[in-house]
Image (cartoon, rainbow, N blue to C red):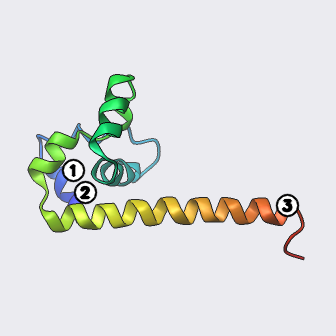
Amino acid sequence: MTVRKLRKNPETKNELGIELASGWDIINVAQALALPDKVIQKINKNGWSSFCANTDLLYKHTNTLDRFIGRIFYWFFIITGLAGAFLVLLNSFGLFD
């Protein structure tokens, strides 16, 4: 619901980062809310800012619950993805017969 609200807002509509696939802006918003400010500043300084959502606008247009849900979603997404890749790696070594 948060990203839908941000998509409809004309101020934030074009500030949600590059959408590589349908719905990728959800991950961009969650990433911008979950990563520490120093990491976001480093990303913006290196020229990768078009891949990330604008954190200043996100904090302006979201409430505490929206930010909490975004952080939980992002870290759950990253942990499950890495765990799945790790299990595939272990399976390729023959640990799961």
Position above or below: 47 against 57: above
Disc 2 + disc 3, Cβ < 8 Å: no
User: The residue under label 3 is which amino acid type?
Assistant: Ser
Q: Which numbered dot is residue 3?
A: 2
Q: Is residue 10 left or right of residue 69?
A: left
Q: CA distance from mark 2 to mark 3?
A: 38 Å
User: The residue under label 1 is which amino acid type?
Assistant: Arg
User: The residue under label 2 is which amino acid type?
Assistant: Val
- Residue at the far bottom in the pictured view: 97
Q: Which numbered dot is residue 16?
A: none
Residue in the image at 32% along x and 28% along y: 44
Element carrying mark 3: helix
Placement of the N terminus among the 4 image quadrants: bottom left
Q: Which numbered dot is residue 92?
A: 3
How far across and how far down the image is residue 85, in percent? 67, 59
In the foreground, 50 or 97: 97
* First of labels 2, 3 by sequence position: 2
Few, some or many C-alpha atoms within 10 Å of disc 2 (few <14, some 14-19, many ≥20)?
Answer: many
Return the residue at label 1.
Answer: 7
Placement of the C terminus among the 4 image quadrants: bottom right
How far across and how far down the image is residue 21, in percent? 47, 47
